[in-house]
Image: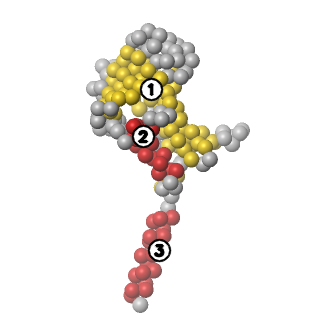
């Protein structure tokens, strides 16, 4: 009789544990009340600045995600440059060096603007970002050729932020996590 009661209790505990939805800590959704369209985005922003304080020089990075057929994928990296008020245009680059020595270059596809706004796609490079920590970032303005290097402010708390986001997308797509 004790074995039966113990088995029932353990089974109940396991079912309760597995039936609880674990919410994503990195990804949120917002529903447009007029169109019922759902938009997904990463919570918060990543701040990188070398020798700057975000008023003098730095970068703010956010992620806008895409959803197709019920699956999330990396969408657009929104990068706002803070500092020199130069106009930028399509073709500016974000060069990323990873801790394992690999490098990749992302190219801004946003039209000309004077607000410091860039849009980059990870398309075809998700695997590289998903399994490698960032060591350094260099932004180059194609119009002025001015650059901003972020190396000293890359640390254990932010070097894996893109990696963690992409891994969390996988967990959501597999049903392990749900979106807030």
Residues marked 2 and 1 touching at CB (< 8 Å): no
**Image quadrant in which the N terminus is located:** bottom left
Q: Is residue 143 above or below residue 36?
A: above
Q: Which residue is mark 1?
A: 106
Marks 2 and 1, how far apart in space? 14 Å
The 10 Å Cα crowd at callout 1, few under 14, some 14 to 19, many 20 or more, is some
Disc sitting over residue 12 in the figure:
3
Residue visible at 50% across and 38% down?
A: 74
Among the 4 quarters of the image, the one containing residue 45: top left
Q: How many marks?
A: 3
Q: Earlier in the sequence, mark 2 or mark 3?
A: 3
Marks 2 and 3, how far apart in space? 39 Å
Q: Nearer the viewer, residue 75 or 101?
A: 101
Residue visible at 44% across and 9% down?
A: 144
The 10 Å Cα crowd at callout 2, few under 14, some 14 to 19, many 20 or more, is few
Residue 157 picture location, percent across and down: 32, 38
**Kind of element beneath mark 3:** helix
Q: Earlier in the sequence, mark 3 or mark 1?
A: 3
**Kind of element beneath mark 2:** helix
The answer to whether residue 54 shows anywhere in this view is: no
- Name the outermost residue toward the right: 34
The 10 Å Cα crowd at callout 3, few under 14, some 14 to 19, many 20 or more, is few
The answer to whether residue 97 shows anywhere in this view is: yes
Q: Is residue 98 above or below residue 31?
A: above
């Amino acid at each position: 009789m004790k074995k039966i009661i113990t088995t029932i209790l353990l089974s109940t505990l396991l079912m309760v544990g597995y039936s609880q939805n674990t919410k994503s800590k990195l990804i949120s959704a917002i529903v447009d009340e007029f169109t019922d369209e759902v938009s997904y985005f990463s919570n918060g922003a990543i701040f990188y600045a070398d020798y700057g304080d975000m008023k003098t020089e730095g970068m703010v990075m956010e992620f806008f995600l895409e959803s197709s057929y019920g699956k999330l994928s990396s969408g657009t990296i929104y990068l706002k440059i803070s500092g020199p008020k130069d106009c930028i245009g399509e073709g500016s680059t974000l060069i990323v060096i990873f801790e394992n020595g690999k490098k990749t270059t992302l190219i801004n596809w946003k039209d000309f603007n004077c607000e410091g706004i860039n849009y980059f796609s990870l398309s075809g490079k998700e695997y590289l970002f998903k399994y490698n920590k960032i060591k350094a970032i260099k932004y180059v303005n194609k119009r002025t050729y001015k650059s901003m290097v972020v190396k000293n402010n890359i640390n254990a708390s932010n070097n894996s932020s893109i990696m963690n986001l992409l891994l969390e997308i996988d967990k959501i797509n597999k049903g392990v996590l749900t979106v807030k």
